[in-house]
Amino acid sequence: MKKILDLVGLANAVTDCIITVTDAELHYVGFKKGAFNRKRHIDLNSFLDFIEEKEKVLVPGGSPANTIRGASNLGLHCGLFGSLGTDLVGKHYIKNLNSIGVDNCFDITSGRSGICYALITPDGERSMMVDMGQAETYGFDISQMNFTKIFHTSGYELLSRPDKVMAAIEYAKSVGAKISFDLAAENVVEVEKKNIDHLINNYIDILFVTEEEAEALVGVEPEKAVQELSKLCEITLFKKGKKGSVVLNKGLSFEIPIYPVKVVNTTGAGDSYAAGFLFGYVQGIHLEACGHLGSQIASKACGQEMPYYLGN
């Protein structure tokens, strides 16, 4: 008999690889400083040779994966679907999941795992490049998913394999899961608007959305846009950064403040908010309290160097 999990995610299994370099080294590998560099503009083989002896910090990532880790740290029984290569990066990714008790539902194929290179110069500037590798193959069988209360993914995954993501959401809904979805980013909404509109109108129960994403999706100012979205989704989480958030449900709304903290690193704050909210939701607590949990966990993530969701 399949066990019932609290929360299952679908993520682009991409690991952040953080490397400290000099400005001269950054120029040598052809990176534009402070920018997102396209892989096609970089000599990948030369770049890989250059970094081979460099000290690296590996941080398993992917937005839904971050949320799954955070929720697992809080005590939910979680699982994660994704695709990895057979390299050390992929093995590190799985080891991290296993260390915090996440059921990994990966397909593993020959080749490089997905990786986001972040080159850090002495002034703290980040220059980035993504090699998706096997992360966008999506060779897993979603029908093997354990029964779950909530299925969570994001717009980033639509950019990789919209067909697979749509099919996974449809399947999860058909076996009784609530569908949780994070719009991810304004540019994602612009590219995948047709698919996102379809999902919101037919499948999504819990929607995480920022001001910029709401406006891009609906075409009106954010407050009005969110009101429209809340008519289509059971629960809408309106994230407003420093202004806090709002939980909307069936005509009701709850204003949620931020929890003050000395900000060290905002990476993953939105994913941590989702983890806290979904944890509370699974526990059956009041939605307003779920919002406060989300805000508290997001604040904790912002107040430490390594994001809260990473676990051990």
Image (cartoon, rainbow, N blue to C red):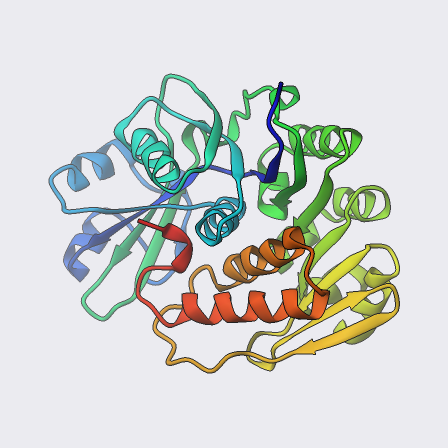
- The residue closer to the viewer here, 110 or 147, is 147
Give the vertical position of 84 relative to 257 (above or below).
above
The x and y percentages for residue 233 are 82, 55
Give the vertical position of 103 relative to 294 (above or below).
above
The x and y percentages for residue 11 are 53, 39
- The residue closer to the viewer here, 161 or 39, is 161
Q: Residue at x 75, y 49 (%)?
A: 193
Please say whether residue 302 is visible from this viewpoint: yes
- Where residue 249 sits, quadrant-wise, is bottom right
The x and y percentages for residue 159 are 60, 41
The x and y percentages for residue 2 are 61, 22
- The residue closer to the viewer here, 162 or 245, is 245
- The residue closer to the viewer here, 287 or 232, is 287
Q: Residue at x 61, y 43 (%)?
A: 153
- Labels in figure, total: 0
Asked if residue 198 lies left or right of residue 88, the reply is right
Q: What quarter of the picture does the N terminus occupy? A: top right
Give the vertical position of 2 relative to 267 (above or below).
above
Furthest residue in direction left, as rendered: 53
Asked if residue 259 lies left or right of residue 150, the reply is left
Asked if residue 144 lies left or right of residue 235, the reply is left
Please say whether residue 182 is visible from this viewpoint: no
Q: Residue at x 61, y 25 (%)?
A: 145
